[in-house]
Image (cartoon, rainbow, N blue to C red):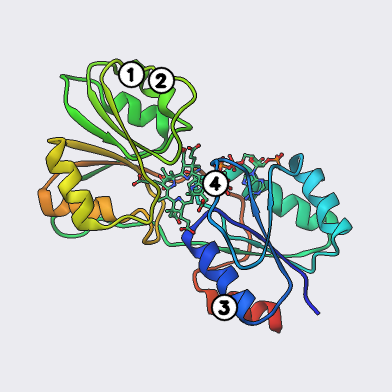
Protein backbone atom coordinates (compact mmCIF):
# COMPACT_ATOMS: atom_id res chain seq x y z
CA UNK A 1 0.00 0.00 0.00
CA UNK A 2 1.49 3.40 -0.96
CA UNK A 3 2.03 6.06 1.72
CA UNK A 4 1.96 9.51 0.09
CA UNK A 5 3.27 12.90 1.18
CA UNK A 6 2.05 15.92 -0.86
CA UNK A 7 3.90 19.23 -0.45
CA UNK A 8 0.97 21.60 -0.96
CA UNK A 9 -0.11 25.22 -0.94
CA UNK A 10 -1.69 25.35 -4.41
CA UNK A 11 -5.07 24.75 -6.00
CA UNK A 12 -3.60 21.75 -7.81
CA UNK A 13 -2.41 20.25 -4.50
CA UNK A 14 -5.94 20.62 -3.13
CA UNK A 15 -7.43 18.92 -6.17
CA UNK A 16 -4.83 16.14 -5.96
CA UNK A 17 -5.53 15.34 -2.30
CA UNK A 18 -9.28 15.35 -3.05
CA UNK A 19 -8.63 12.64 -5.66
CA UNK A 20 -6.29 10.69 -3.34
CA UNK A 21 -8.89 10.80 -0.54
CA UNK A 22 -11.58 9.52 -2.93
CA UNK A 23 -9.23 6.70 -3.96
CA UNK A 24 -8.68 5.97 -0.24
CA UNK A 25 -4.91 6.18 -0.65
CA UNK A 26 -3.07 7.04 2.59
CA UNK A 27 -2.01 10.68 2.17
CA UNK A 28 -0.58 13.52 4.24
CA UNK A 29 -0.66 17.11 2.96
CA UNK A 30 2.13 19.41 4.12
CA UNK A 31 1.90 23.21 4.55
CA UNK A 32 4.76 25.53 5.50
CA UNK A 33 2.50 27.40 7.94
CA UNK A 34 2.57 30.66 5.96
CA UNK A 35 -1.02 31.57 6.71
CA UNK A 36 -3.03 31.58 9.93
CA UNK A 37 -5.81 29.28 8.75
CA UNK A 38 -4.80 26.92 5.95
CA UNK A 39 -7.68 25.53 3.96
CA UNK A 40 -9.26 22.40 5.54
CA UNK A 41 -8.40 19.25 3.61
CA UNK A 42 -9.89 15.66 3.39
CA UNK A 43 -6.55 14.06 4.35
CA UNK A 44 -4.11 14.33 7.28
CA UNK A 45 -2.38 17.72 7.32
CA UNK A 46 0.99 18.63 8.83
CA UNK A 47 2.12 22.26 9.15
CA UNK A 48 5.64 23.70 9.44
CA UNK A 49 9.13 23.27 8.02
CA UNK A 50 11.00 19.96 8.11
CA UNK A 51 14.44 21.43 8.89
CA UNK A 52 15.97 21.55 5.41
CA UNK A 53 16.56 18.64 3.02
CA UNK A 54 18.02 16.47 5.80
CA UNK A 55 14.96 17.08 7.97
CA UNK A 56 12.65 16.18 5.11
CA UNK A 57 14.71 13.02 4.40
CA UNK A 58 14.37 12.04 8.06
CA UNK A 59 10.61 12.60 7.87
CA UNK A 60 10.33 10.49 4.70
CA UNK A 61 12.16 7.58 6.35
CA UNK A 62 10.44 7.87 9.74
CA UNK A 63 6.98 7.95 8.16
CA UNK A 64 7.79 5.28 5.56
CA UNK A 65 6.69 7.61 2.77
CA UNK A 66 6.69 5.67 -0.53
CA UNK A 67 5.72 8.55 -2.84
CA UNK A 68 6.61 12.26 -2.48
CA UNK A 69 4.58 14.65 -4.67
CA UNK A 70 5.87 18.23 -4.89
CA UNK A 71 2.72 20.24 -5.69
CA UNK A 72 4.06 23.53 -4.33
CA UNK A 73 3.93 26.93 -6.01
CA UNK A 74 6.59 27.54 -8.71
CA UNK A 75 8.07 30.35 -6.57
CA UNK A 76 8.60 27.95 -3.65
CA UNK A 77 12.06 27.10 -5.02
CA UNK A 78 13.70 26.20 -1.71
CA UNK A 79 11.29 23.44 -0.68
CA UNK A 80 11.31 22.08 -4.23
CA UNK A 81 15.10 21.93 -4.27
CA UNK A 82 15.11 20.34 -0.80
CA UNK A 83 12.58 17.73 -1.99
CA UNK A 84 14.92 16.57 -4.76
CA UNK A 85 17.80 16.09 -2.31
CA UNK A 86 15.63 14.55 0.40
CA UNK A 87 14.09 12.02 -2.00
CA UNK A 88 17.60 10.95 -3.08
CA UNK A 89 18.77 10.64 0.55
CA UNK A 90 15.71 8.65 1.63
CA UNK A 91 15.36 6.62 -1.58
CA UNK A 92 11.77 7.89 -1.99
CA UNK A 93 10.03 8.24 -5.36
CA UNK A 94 9.55 11.95 -6.26
CA UNK A 95 7.21 13.53 -8.80
CA UNK A 96 6.41 17.23 -9.20
CA UNK A 97 2.88 18.36 -10.11
CA UNK A 98 3.41 21.72 -11.79
CA UNK A 99 1.48 24.22 -13.91
CA UNK A 100 2.84 25.52 -17.20
CA UNK A 101 3.86 29.20 -17.01
CA UNK A 102 1.32 31.70 -18.33
CA UNK A 103 2.07 33.10 -21.78
CA UNK A 104 0.80 36.43 -23.07
CA UNK A 105 -1.95 36.37 -25.69
CA UNK A 106 -3.63 38.96 -27.90
CA UNK A 107 -4.52 42.04 -25.90
CA UNK A 108 -2.02 41.40 -23.10
CA UNK A 109 0.49 44.18 -22.32
CA UNK A 110 3.14 42.27 -20.35
CA UNK A 111 6.73 43.18 -19.63
CA UNK A 112 8.81 40.29 -18.23
CA UNK A 113 11.33 40.71 -15.40
CA UNK A 114 13.53 37.93 -13.98
CA UNK A 115 12.84 38.41 -10.24
CA UNK A 116 11.40 40.63 -7.49
CA UNK A 117 14.35 43.13 -7.43
CA UNK A 118 13.94 43.67 -11.19
CA UNK A 119 10.20 44.25 -10.68
CA UNK A 120 11.07 46.93 -8.09
CA UNK A 121 13.45 48.59 -10.56
CA UNK A 122 10.77 48.49 -13.26
CA UNK A 123 8.57 50.65 -10.99
CA UNK A 124 10.96 53.60 -11.19
CA UNK A 125 9.22 56.73 -12.48
CA UNK A 126 6.21 58.90 -11.68
CA UNK A 127 3.57 57.85 -9.15
CA UNK A 128 0.95 55.38 -10.35
CA UNK A 129 -1.82 53.23 -8.86
CA UNK A 130 -0.13 49.83 -8.69
CA UNK A 131 -1.76 46.51 -7.76
CA UNK A 132 0.91 44.38 -6.05
CA UNK A 133 -0.64 40.90 -6.30
CA UNK A 134 2.36 39.21 -4.71
CA UNK A 135 1.19 38.46 -1.19
CA UNK A 136 2.99 39.53 1.96
CA UNK A 137 6.48 38.00 1.84
CA UNK A 138 8.12 40.49 -0.51
CA UNK A 139 6.43 43.81 0.31
CA UNK A 140 9.50 45.37 1.97
CA UNK A 141 11.41 45.30 -1.34
CA UNK A 142 8.96 47.80 -2.84
CA UNK A 143 9.82 50.45 -0.22
CA UNK A 144 12.46 51.49 -2.78
CA UNK A 145 9.59 52.89 -4.87
CA UNK A 146 7.51 54.79 -2.27
CA UNK A 147 5.98 57.18 -4.80
CA UNK A 148 3.20 54.82 -5.89
CA UNK A 149 -0.24 54.20 -4.44
CA UNK A 150 -0.20 50.42 -3.80
CA UNK A 151 -3.18 48.06 -3.67
CA UNK A 152 -2.00 45.06 -1.63
CA UNK A 153 -3.95 41.77 -1.66
CA UNK A 154 -2.91 39.62 1.30
CA UNK A 155 -4.15 36.42 2.90
CA UNK A 156 -3.51 37.59 6.46
CA UNK A 157 -3.14 41.08 7.93
CA UNK A 158 0.56 41.92 8.27
CA UNK A 159 1.90 42.11 11.87
CA UNK A 160 3.47 45.48 11.09
CA UNK A 161 2.27 48.03 8.52
CA UNK A 162 4.07 47.53 5.19
CA UNK A 163 6.87 50.11 4.65
CA UNK A 164 4.86 51.75 1.85
CA UNK A 165 3.60 55.29 2.66
CA UNK A 166 0.57 55.08 0.38
CA UNK A 167 -1.07 51.65 0.42
CA UNK A 168 -4.47 50.00 0.74
CA UNK A 169 -4.68 46.45 2.10
CA UNK A 170 -7.29 43.98 0.86
CA UNK A 171 -7.52 40.78 2.91
CA UNK A 172 -8.62 38.05 0.52
CA UNK A 173 -7.54 34.53 -0.37
CA UNK A 174 -7.88 33.07 -3.85
CA UNK A 175 -8.86 31.48 -6.10
CA UNK A 176 -10.12 34.75 -7.60
CA UNK A 177 -12.68 35.69 -10.25
CA UNK A 178 -11.96 37.85 -13.31
CA UNK A 179 -15.08 40.02 -13.06
CA UNK A 180 -14.45 40.69 -9.36
CA UNK A 181 -10.80 41.49 -10.09
CA UNK A 182 -11.82 43.87 -12.92
CA UNK A 183 -14.25 45.70 -10.61
CA UNK A 184 -11.51 45.91 -7.95
CA UNK A 185 -9.06 47.40 -10.45
CA UNK A 186 -11.61 49.95 -11.66
CA UNK A 187 -12.56 50.91 -8.10
CA UNK A 188 -8.89 51.63 -7.34
CA UNK A 189 -8.14 53.12 -10.77
CA UNK A 190 -5.26 50.66 -11.16
CA UNK A 191 -2.89 51.55 -14.01
CA UNK A 192 -0.24 48.82 -13.46
CA UNK A 193 -0.19 45.28 -12.04
CA UNK A 194 2.78 43.31 -10.69
CA UNK A 195 2.35 39.52 -10.76
CA UNK A 196 4.36 36.33 -10.35
CA UNK A 197 4.15 33.83 -13.17
CA UNK A 198 2.36 31.33 -10.95
CA UNK A 199 0.54 29.55 -13.77
CA UNK A 200 -2.62 27.61 -13.06
CA UNK A 201 -6.06 29.13 -12.61
CA UNK A 202 -6.09 30.25 -8.95
CA UNK A 203 -4.30 33.53 -9.59
CA UNK A 204 -5.11 33.99 -13.28
CA UNK A 205 -8.20 36.17 -12.77
CA UNK A 206 -6.16 39.38 -12.47
CA UNK A 207 -4.55 38.76 -15.87
CA UNK A 208 -7.91 38.24 -17.56
CA UNK A 209 -9.16 41.43 -15.91
CA UNK A 210 -6.00 43.33 -16.95
CA UNK A 211 -6.48 42.22 -20.58
CA UNK A 212 -10.12 43.37 -20.53
CA UNK A 213 -9.20 46.74 -19.01
CA UNK A 214 -6.01 47.06 -21.05
CA UNK A 215 -3.84 47.47 -17.95
CA UNK A 216 -0.12 46.69 -18.36
CA UNK A 217 1.39 43.88 -16.27
CA UNK A 218 4.93 43.45 -14.94
CA UNK A 219 5.27 39.64 -15.02
CA UNK A 220 7.91 38.12 -12.76
CA UNK A 221 9.50 34.99 -14.21
CA UNK A 222 9.90 31.88 -12.09
CA UNK A 223 13.07 31.14 -10.09
CA UNK A 224 15.16 28.21 -11.35
CA UNK A 225 14.50 24.75 -9.86
CA UNK A 226 16.82 21.76 -10.55
CA UNK A 227 15.52 19.11 -12.96
CA UNK A 228 13.07 16.51 -11.57
CA UNK A 229 10.32 14.34 -12.99
CA UNK A 230 7.20 16.49 -13.42
CA UNK A 231 3.66 16.26 -14.77
CA UNK A 232 0.89 18.83 -15.21
CA UNK A 233 -2.11 16.58 -14.68
CA UNK A 234 -3.50 14.92 -11.58
CA UNK A 235 -4.37 11.78 -13.57
CA UNK A 236 -0.67 11.29 -14.32
CA UNK A 237 0.13 11.54 -10.60
CA UNK A 238 -2.49 8.88 -9.78
CA UNK A 239 -1.11 6.60 -12.53
CA UNK A 240 2.42 7.06 -11.13
CA UNK A 241 1.30 6.19 -7.60
CA UNK A 242 -0.74 3.13 -8.59
CA UNK A 243 1.72 1.85 -11.23
C1 LIG B 1 -0.09 28.75 2.77
C2 LIG B 1 -2.83 27.64 1.74
C3 LIG B 1 -6.35 26.24 -2.71
C4 LIG B 1 -4.99 26.90 -2.79
C5 LIG B 1 -5.13 28.28 -3.32
C6 LIG B 1 -2.57 28.82 -6.41
C7 LIG B 1 -3.77 29.53 -6.08
C8 LIG B 1 -5.24 30.67 -4.49
C9 LIG B 1 -3.54 32.82 -5.80
C10 LIG B 1 -3.21 37.47 -6.20
C11 LIG B 1 -2.20 36.35 -6.07
C12 LIG B 1 0.04 34.68 -4.00
C13 LIG B 1 -0.23 34.01 -2.62
C14 LIG B 1 -1.77 33.20 -4.11
C15 LIG B 1 -2.67 32.34 -4.66
C16 LIG B 1 -3.86 30.01 -4.61
C17 LIG B 1 -3.75 28.92 -3.55
C18 LIG B 1 -2.76 30.93 -4.17
C19 LIG B 1 -1.28 34.45 -4.74
C20 LIG B 1 -2.71 29.81 0.17
C21 LIG B 1 -2.21 28.91 1.27
C22 LIG B 1 -0.96 29.34 1.68
C23 LIG B 1 -0.60 30.43 0.87
C24 LIG B 1 0.70 31.15 0.98
C25 LIG B 1 0.69 32.43 0.24
C26 LIG B 1 2.01 33.22 0.26
C27 LIG B 1 1.79 34.19 -0.93
C28 LIG B 1 0.98 33.36 -1.92
C29 LIG B 1 -0.97 34.93 -1.67
C30 LIG B 1 -4.34 27.67 1.83
C31 LIG B 1 -3.95 30.57 0.52
C32 LIG B 1 0.41 36.14 -3.86
C33 LIG B 1 1.15 33.95 -4.80
O1 LIG B 1 0.63 36.09 3.84
C34 LIG B 1 1.52 35.33 3.42
O2 LIG B 1 2.63 35.15 3.99
C35 LIG B 1 1.23 34.63 2.13
C36 LIG B 1 2.24 33.92 1.56
C37 LIG B 1 3.20 32.32 0.09
C38 LIG B 1 3.07 34.66 -1.59
C39 LIG B 1 3.84 35.70 -0.86
O3 LIG B 1 4.98 35.89 -1.27
O4 LIG B 1 3.26 36.32 0.07
N1 LIG B 1 0.50 32.19 -1.18
N2 LIG B 1 -1.57 30.73 -0.01
C40 LIG B 1 0.75 27.64 2.18
C41 LIG B 1 1.64 26.99 3.23
O5 LIG B 1 1.64 27.42 4.39
O6 LIG B 1 2.34 26.02 2.84
O7 LIG B 1 -4.85 28.09 2.87
O8 LIG B 1 -4.95 27.27 0.82
C42 LIG B 1 -2.91 28.97 -1.07
C43 LIG B 1 -3.16 29.62 -2.36
N3 LIG B 1 -2.79 30.84 -2.67
O9 LIG B 1 -6.34 25.05 -2.40
O10 LIG B 1 -7.37 26.89 -2.96
O11 LIG B 1 -2.69 27.57 -6.64
O12 LIG B 1 -1.44 29.39 -6.58
N4 LIG B 1 -1.14 32.94 -2.96
C44 LIG B 1 1.17 34.28 -6.29
O13 LIG B 1 0.71 33.45 -7.07
O14 LIG B 1 1.66 35.39 -6.63
C45 LIG B 1 -2.28 35.63 -4.73
O15 LIG B 1 -3.49 38.15 -5.19
O16 LIG B 1 -3.70 37.67 -7.33
P1 LIG C 1 10.11 28.21 0.02
O1 LIG C 1 10.70 29.58 0.05
O2 LIG C 1 10.41 27.30 -1.12
O3 LIG C 1 10.45 27.39 1.36
C1 LIG C 1 11.04 28.02 2.48
C2 LIG C 1 10.97 27.01 3.63
O4 LIG C 1 9.60 26.88 4.03
C3 LIG C 1 11.38 25.60 3.22
O5 LIG C 1 12.78 25.43 3.26
C4 LIG C 1 10.65 24.75 4.26
O6 LIG C 1 11.27 24.84 5.53
C5 LIG C 1 9.33 25.50 4.37
N1 LIG C 1 8.30 25.01 3.46
C6 LIG C 1 7.92 25.53 2.28
N2 LIG C 1 6.85 24.87 1.77
C7 LIG C 1 6.57 23.89 2.65
C8 LIG C 1 5.58 22.87 2.70
N3 LIG C 1 4.65 22.76 1.74
N4 LIG C 1 5.58 22.02 3.78
C9 LIG C 1 6.50 22.16 4.76
N5 LIG C 1 7.45 23.12 4.79
C10 LIG C 1 7.48 23.97 3.73
O7 LIG C 1 8.51 28.30 0.15
P2 LIG C 1 7.55 29.61 0.08
O8 LIG C 1 7.72 30.28 -1.24
O9 LIG C 1 7.74 30.35 1.36
O10 LIG C 1 6.13 28.91 0.05
C11 LIG C 1 5.63 28.35 1.24
C12 LIG C 1 4.33 27.65 0.96
O11 LIG C 1 3.40 28.56 0.38
C13 LIG C 1 4.44 26.47 0.01
O12 LIG C 1 3.57 25.45 0.45
C14 LIG C 1 3.95 27.03 -1.31
O13 LIG C 1 3.37 26.03 -2.13
C15 LIG C 1 2.91 28.01 -0.84
N6 LIG C 1 2.74 29.10 -1.80
C16 LIG C 1 3.80 29.90 -2.07
C17 LIG C 1 3.62 30.91 -3.01
C18 LIG C 1 4.75 31.85 -3.35
O14 LIG C 1 4.47 32.83 -4.05
N7 LIG C 1 5.95 31.60 -2.87
C19 LIG C 1 2.37 31.08 -3.64
C20 LIG C 1 1.30 30.21 -3.31
C21 LIG C 1 1.50 29.22 -2.37
P3 LIG C 1 12.36 23.75 6.04
O15 LIG C 1 13.61 24.09 5.30
O16 LIG C 1 12.44 23.97 7.53
O17 LIG C 1 11.83 22.39 5.68
Question: According to the image, label 4 marks what residue?
Answer: 37
The Cα–Cα distance between marks 3 and 4, rounded to whole angstroms, is 30 Å
Quick check: 12 above or below 203?
Answer: below
Read off the residue under disc 3.
236
Question: Which of the 4 image quadrants contains residue 196?
Answer: top left
Q: How far is the residue under mark 3 from the one under mark 1?
A: 44 Å
Residue 43 percent across, percent down from the top left: 66, 66
Q: Which tag, 4 or 1, sits closer to the chain's start?
A: 4
3 or 4: tag closer to the N-terminus: 4
Q: Are dots 2 and 4 in contact, CB under 8 Å?
A: no
Residue 101 at what x, y percent from top left? 39, 57
User: Ligand 1 near label 1 (Cβ, under 8 Å)?
Assistant: no
Residue at image location 85% in from the left, 50% down from the top: 58
Please tell me which residue is depicted at 23% across the width and 32% down the height of the picture: 130
Residue where numbered disc 2 is placed:
161
* Distance (Cα) linking label 2 and label 4: 20 Å
Is residue 238 placed above or below 41 in the rendered structure? below
Helix, strand or loop under label 2: loop
**Residue 146 x/y as whole percent:** 28, 16
Amino acid sequence: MPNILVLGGTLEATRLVDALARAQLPTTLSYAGRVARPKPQPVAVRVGGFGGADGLARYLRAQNITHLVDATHPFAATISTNAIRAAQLAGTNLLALTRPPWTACAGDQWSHVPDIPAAVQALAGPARNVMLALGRMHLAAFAAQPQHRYLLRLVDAPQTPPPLPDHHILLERGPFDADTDAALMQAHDITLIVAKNAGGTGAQAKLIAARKLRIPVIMIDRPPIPARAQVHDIANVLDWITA
